[in-house]
Amino acid sequence: MHSVDATTEQMIRSVLAYAENRLRLDPVPLDRGSRDPAELEAALGGLLAEEGHNPDQILGAYAATLAPAVLSADSPRFLGFIPAAPTKAALLFDMLVSCASVQGISWLEAAGAVHAENQVLRLLADRAGLPAGAGGCFVAGGSAGNLSALAVAREMAKRKAAARPGPAGGAGAAAPAGPARWRVAVSADSHSSIGNTLRLLEMDPLPVPAPGHRLTGEALRATIDADGDPGSVAAVVATAGTTNAGIIDDLAGAAAVARDLGAWLHVDGAYGGAGLFAPSVRAAYDGIEHADSLVIDPHKWLFAPYDCAALLYRDPAAARSVHRQDASYLDVIHAGDDGGPAEWNPTDYAYHLTRRARGLPLWFSLAVHGTRAYTEAIETAIALAAQAAAEIRARGYLELIREPQLSVVLFRRRGWGPENYTRWADSLLADQVAFLPPSAWEGETVARFAFLHPHTPIGLVREVLDRME
Ligand SMILES: Cc1ncc(COP(=O)(O)O)c(C=O)c1O
């Protein structure tokens, strides 16, 4: 299994030939995700057995049965949820990272990979205006980033409460300091992973009514002022690009309130953070520079393959004090760890230990193409959203729900109910035109474009809209 024998040679030829063909697809076809499990089992049953099989037979089963049963999120026709659109450069380099099993755990083991990843993190931190000391690591996704960041926020709140002098459990008191459960100010439009995170960390949401689905400093302040226990608010979560509508919260306003409250500001830019590269919308992110923690997912709009999310902290030492794992056999990776960048251990900045160097494909692609190409590709999706909005306005049977701020467009077909949307979406997929599952807006089933791929043509948008008439 580990030597280079005739079977290995055969696999190298076959698998690389398959990968080459896949890389050359332009455009990538949509395919279909959902399948009858019996159909899949009929093709694959018995393949995992005591004795192995010819690799070409297994690759054939993958190509014939499995691959077409996975929707291609990197197809320009994938317009639902949040798509992916990895560059060819990033995909190629991801293969290299896999081939070499490049790890990115500690400086001791992987200084080269970690240094390159840190260059990318620095680039993102600069775009956001975070200070020179900011840093973090790449994690598997926005959910993992949100969880890791808010774990630090909760711990910082606990420590602050413990250090506060006074009878209510301050320094030296017997009772635990702080509230029984910490709370986090969130709007209803924050991502579902924030709700999950709060459950996992045993924190409660402090819901902030968001006028027009945008959390504002004013609404946040009013909520805090009316609250009987603002001292139990450990953090404020603001979203830089909501998933369903692409709205950027009032980050400057949220930052000011968080500062006055002494609470942690977490900015979830998993989807929309890439807009920091787009001059046409950059002003909407003002205030992001005050974030204590920030998540931006390159596997969304920075054209990296799965799975890649950037997690940045204003004060990485705080994160390290929460996430660092200690064990006798790990002492060596922390020896000489003075907190400086020379001994940067990505494992110390999130809930993980072993990790692949998942930032490297983005590093390679950024270095090959330059940041201007990224700006242009991101602006293309923003412009396409504006064009789609214009197409919707021009059709009497459609109604634009709100002007797109980023690359998501919500709209309704006058007179349609949920079944109409489902039939329309099913037929678009059946005909391999587009993947565009319905969404909901204020309780109503609606249609939603999520654009990311720079090669999605306006002609496809028109075709999708025409099929609603
Ligand atoms: C704003 C936002 N936050 C978090 C996430 C979760 O990211 P992931 O699916 O990579 O865990 C998403 C995913 O769409 C998102 O849009």
Image (cartoon, grey):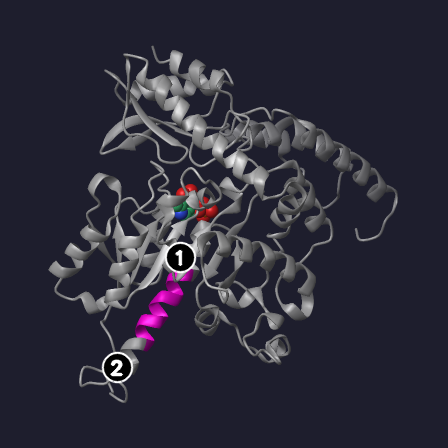
Q: Nearer the viewer, residue 134 or 61?
A: 134
Find numbered disc 1 in the image and state the secondary structure of the residue it sits on.
helix
First of labels 1, 2 by sequence position: 2
Residue that sits furthest to the bottom in the current view: 172
Q: Which residues are magenta?
A: 149-159
Of the residues shown, which amino acid type is indicated by label 1?
Glu
| Residue under the image location 19 percent in, 47 percent down | 209
Q: Is residue 242 left or right of residue 428?
A: left
Residue 164: give its label: 2
Q: Main secondary structure of the magenta part?
A: helix
Instruction: Give the percent coordinates (x, y) of residue 44.
Output: 63, 33
Asked if the beta carbon under badge 2 is closer than 8 A to the nearest atom of ligand 1, the reply is no
In the rendered image of this protein, does residue 373 appear above or below residue 183?
A: above
Q: Is residue 139 left or right of residue 393?
A: right
* Residue 268 magenta-highlighted: no
Instruction: Give the percent coordinates (x, y) of residue 249.
Output: 31, 46
| Residue under the image location 47 percent in, 19 percent down | 458
Q: Is residue 21 left or right of residue 428?
A: right
Can residue 84 be seen in this snapshot?
A: no
Residue 263: give its label: none
Q: Quadrant of the C terminus?
A: top left
Of the residues shown, which amino acid type is indicated by label 2?
Arg
In the rendered image of this protein, does residue 410 appear above or below residue 302?
A: above
Instruction: Give the percent coordinates (x, y) of residue 278.
Output: 47, 40
Cα–Cα span, label 1 and label 2: 28 Å
* Residue 150 magenta-highlighted: yes
Q: Nearer the viewer, mark 1 or mark 2?
A: 1
Find numbered disc 2 in the image and state the secondary structure of the residue it sits on.
loop
Q: Quadrant of residue 213?
A: top left
Q: Provide the residue designation for mark 1.
A: 289
Q: Nearer the viewer, residue 192 or 268?
A: 268
Q: How many marks?
A: 2
